[in-house]
Amino acid sequence: MPSRIPRRTFLTGLAGGAVALSTDPARAAALPEPRREDGSLFSTPPMVWAPRADGADILWAVSRLARGRVEIREPGGRVRVVAEDRYGFTPQSPQLMRVRLDGLQPGTEYEWRAVADAIDGAGGREETPWKHLRTLDPATSRSHFVVWNDTHEHHETIQRLQQVTPSADFLLWNGDTCNDWHEEEWLVPTLMAPAGLDISEGHPLLLTLGNHDIRGKYGFRLPEHVGFPGDRPYYAFRNGPVAIIGLNTGEDKPDDHPSFHGRVASQRLREEQAEWLERTIIRPEFANAPFRIVFCHIPLRWLDEPEVVDYAGGGYDHYARSSRDLWHDALVRWGAQVVISGHTHRTQSIPASAAFPYAQITGGGPRLEQATWMEAEADDAALTITVRRLETGEIASQDRFPRLT
């Protein structure tokens, strides 16, 4: 018989010792890769990434060489098995498993579970309990989603965020999931079991990358551990009346800064996104959207914007000037209403102006006294974005945007 993994037992096993992350920003000790003492195939819970109208990506870590698949129970009760990759293999790996779900119906509730079969050694099969996934719906009249910023591996903050975050269409993790990737072993516990949790439960997960997310000698391995719609670190989609564009602002210093050791190429990616933006904003589902939001980790506007930054003396970009120079005109032509960012570890709402017709909202921070979470709700009349302080629950800011069309 296949073994089943009770959720409480599974996540408790993950959260104890093996997955415990330091809440010290300096991260004095290396973080071991999560391992189950009982020899389980599943090293992390399977998480739902990159929700779309027609599917999502399911990712999890395994403890040894295994095959993986996802079983989907459709509304009528039929069970479909997804067990193939883009290259004609069944999904298999000694460490990371990814199964892409396609061909689902928009705005539809599905049940699913992940299954792993050991290839080597004693063999065996394990399956998770049945879980729920609701696909996004571009045609619905309402939208509800939540946003986290700048968690930086702080366990207590992530645990509290998960406790207060309601079920929603999706959760957008808006950058700086980590401090850096100087050790390869930090990737799995930080991204695939943050604080020992499945943070995609109740709100499938989208990611925009922050500057810390691409920092360190193993930053190049991050894409293996997460999912993006379209498999690029920027994307656009409709969720009901809201059109969403997620952008990648890259690092907060020039690519040739000596601290990067030649590892980043953010400027070319910014230019690529500028070209992509020109094509995206004229697509009917975006050009005619009633509400229009941009997500990017480093804000495109800030309270003070110095012309010169002393990078050699420890300075860094408080706002993404190089990104804004490339993207601003397209965002104005599109009619972007608001840019939602993190990076500053400060809650701030900057209203639109003649020079910058889009508002800028920031929030988040790794420590409880800084941390916030955002909730956005849109209906036929308006889009409301509320920023709440995690520690007290009080409203830090609230902005309302009228329907455009």
Image (tube, rainbow, N blue to C red):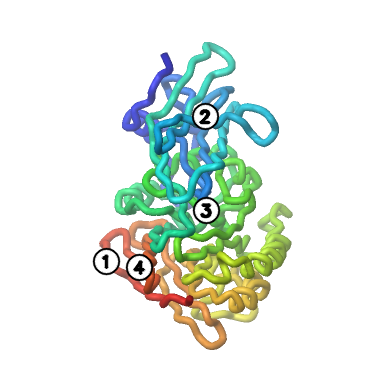
The local secondary structure at tag 2 comes to strand
Q: Earlier in the sequence, mark 4 or mark 1?
A: 4
Q: Residues within 10 Å of mark 1 (few under 14, many from 20)?
A: few
Distance (Cα) linking label 3 and label 4: 20 Å
Residue annotated with mark 4 = 386
Q: Earlier in the sequence, mark 2 or mark 4?
A: 2
Disc 2 target residue: 81
Residue 326 visible somewhere in the drawing: yes
Residue 384 vertical position relative to residue 129 in the rendered view, above or below: below
The Cα–Cα distance between marks 3 and 2, rounded to whole angstroms, is 26 Å
Q: Amino acid at mark 3?
A: Leu
Residue hosting label 1: 394
Q: Is residue 160 above or below residue 258?
A: above
How many numbered discs? 4
Tell me whether the residue at label 3 lies in contact with that at label 1, contact meaning CB atoms closer than 8 angstroms: no
Q: Quadrant of residue 383?
A: bottom left
The location of residue 253, given as percent across then percent down, is: 64, 65
Say which of marks 2 and 1 sits in front: 2
Name the side, left or right, on which 103 lies relative to 78: right
